[in-house]
Image: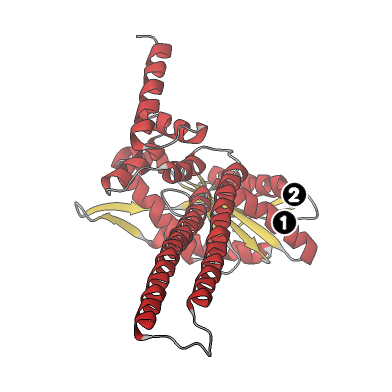
Amino acid sequence: MSVQKSLAEIGQKVFSELHDMGVPPTPECYEVWFKYRQNSTPELTKEIETHIAAGKRVDADFLMRIFYQFCENKDLGPVFQRYFERMLGEVEGLQGVAQGLSESAKEFGSDVAVLSPAPDQTISDAELRSLLAALIETAAQATQRNQELENKLSVAIDNISRLRDSIEAIEQDAYTDYLTKLANRRRFEKFLNDAIEYAERDKEPLSLIICDIDYFKKFNDEYGHQIGDQVLKYVADVLRNNTKGRDLAARYGGEEFAIVLPNTTLKNAQTLAEQIRVRLAKKRLVNKAGNQDLGTITMSFGVAEHVGSTGAESLFERADQALYEAKAEGRNKVVIHERMRLHRA
């Protein structure tokens, strides 16, 4: 079977399965489900299978969240625009319900006015009973109309609430690393650019730490990817617990992490990197399943401070150069890059 034919069969299967799930075959939903059926992105496949195993429904909103989490370089603008349009539709529905309630109240008032006798009018018992029956019927009809409108109002409010939750979830997943729950590369790059803009505007220092787990591939090969994933989560927890306020810890990719430190001097960033390095190096890891001693995890660190108006790329390159020097000198080190000079800690 040719590769083209195999891909075509997967494509046909994807269309069929999306239809069976009630999911519109938009380009985003199609791409996610195609990658899932092709098993071309293990992280994406794992996330979907975990979702399904939990008994949760696969719908368009879930696939959109997966799309913006795992498909790189995608603009969030179009999906937010679609949700905004759906939100507008619900708001228009609310306006219609409000108008309907107002008209129903006016109609009920008119009916009561017609049925009400004049103040000086004398009526018999039979006429009074008839009048009361008419008023009760009119009130019952008005109550029914209002109940129908209130039901529509409740549905519209629920829909808007779900849309809001979906937008928040998509945005959260789009900027969060699936494994460590730190900020992902997309979030890191946006945050770093914004932080540089604020630092230049407010005349504040800004530093960046780039760090990398030493010999992680060897560790992964020896103990397996599941243990490797646990190590990545542990490192992420250490970084998370050592950052606060305006700081941002992110998983840049693989075993490489980054910490953006607004309003932080190079010296203070160096001190933080050294604290993290020492804390990691002192911790012996144990596989609880087999009580296996996994040894220690060490990291190498490169630190740089934003200078002038050089931009995010320059800052990252200088921190990355310092990291390269730390690894070249034996790893488990902190190296700082200050303008054109490298300093070791």
Picture coordinates of residue 208 (x, y %)? 63, 56
Whether 212 is drawn above or below 116: the answer is above
Instruction: Between residue 307 and residue 345, name the one nearer to us.
Output: 307
Which type of secondary structure does the marked residue at label 1 adopt?
Answer: helix
Q: Quadrant of residue 134?
A: bottom left
- Look at the numbered disc 2 and give the secondary structure of its residue: helix
Which residue does the image show at 20% across and 52% down from the upper left? 289
How would you rate the neighbour count of disc 2 (Cα within 10 Å): few for under 14, some for 14-19, many for 20 or more?
A: some
Quarter of the figure with the N terminus: top left
Say above or below: 162 vs 127. above
Q: Residue furthest top?
A: 1
Residue 311 seen by the camera: yes
Classify mark 1: residues with Cα within 10 Å, few (<14), some (14-19) or many (20+): many
Which amino acid type is shown beneath numbered disc 2?
Gly
Pointers 1 and 2 in contact (C-beta within 8 Å): yes
Nearer-the-camera pick, 311 or 49: 49
Quadrant showing the C terminus: bottom right
Q: What is the CA distance from the residue labelled 1 to the residue labelled 2? A: 7 Å
Whole-percent x, y for residue 60 in the image: 44, 42
Picture quarter containing residue 11?
top left
Give the label on residue 311, or none: 2
Query: Residue under circle 1?
Result: 196
Residue placed farthest to the left in the image?
290
Relative to 167, is 268 on the left or the right? right
Q: Earlier in the sequence, mark 1 or mark 2?
A: 1
